[in-house]
Amino acid sequence: MNPTNRNRLVAVVALVLAGAALAFIAYGNLGENLVYYWSPSQLLAQGEKAYGPTIRLGGMVKAGTIQWTPDKTHLDFEVADGKEPDAKSVKVSSDEIPPQMFREGIGVVVEGTYDKSNVFRTTRLMVNHSNEYRPPKAGESQQDWQKSLLEPQANADDGKPK
């Protein structure tokens, strides 16, 4: 076999392998492993297509909706598009212990499935929080320190090194 024919054969084999790999990805069972990320309004707009697949639902914990049953480690709350009272929301149910920072008005991402009873059954609950950390000041109680972390900063970072 001369070098020209060998190079052509190698090129053809490489193209066939690349095409087979692309076909496997495109037509294989890859779609069964996808996780969609939707807001409450996007989830509700999907209608019956939202029932069944694994979804990550992101939004804000709606004020006044948290119901925690510690003896059964059961949590019910609503995830809304925003903090507005009339924002679209979805009921969420979890049998997991919530993260320590979980509270009303915090951003959350829940992963699970939406069922025909219009309840999102979550298997994973994550809170969105800032990466700000401030150690407690000398003499500051733990409650005061925690409150200061939860409140918005009154003095924004002025850009000066500390």
Image (cartoon, rainbow, N blue to C red):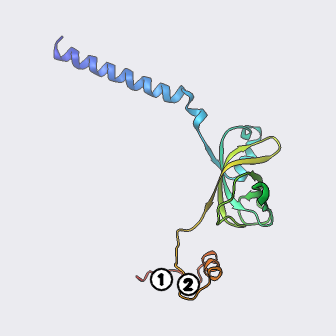
Q: CA distance from mark 2 to mark 1?
A: 8 Å
Which quadrant does the N terminus fall into?
A: top left
Between 43 and 136, the residue placed more toward the observer is 136
Question: Residue beneath label 1, please?
Answer: 158
Neighbor class of circle 1 (other Cα within 10 Å; few <14, some 14-19, many 20+) is: few
Q: Position of residue 36 (x, y in %)?
A: 62, 44
Name the image quarter holding residue 52: top right
Give the labeled residue for mark 2: 155
Q: Residue furthest bottom?
A: 139
Q: Are marks 2 and 1 in contact (CB under 8 Å)?
A: yes
Judging depth in this view, the residue of 146 and 119 nearest the camera is: 146
Q: Residue 85: x and y, percent?
A: 79, 65
Residue 108: mark = none
What amino acid type should be assigned to the residue bearing mark 2?
A: Asn
Q: Is residue 143 above or below residue 23?
A: below
Q: Is residue 2 left or right of residue 59?
A: left
x and y, in percent, of residue 120 in the image: 75, 48
Q: Quadrant of residue 17?
A: top left
Residue displayed at 69% across by 57% down = 97
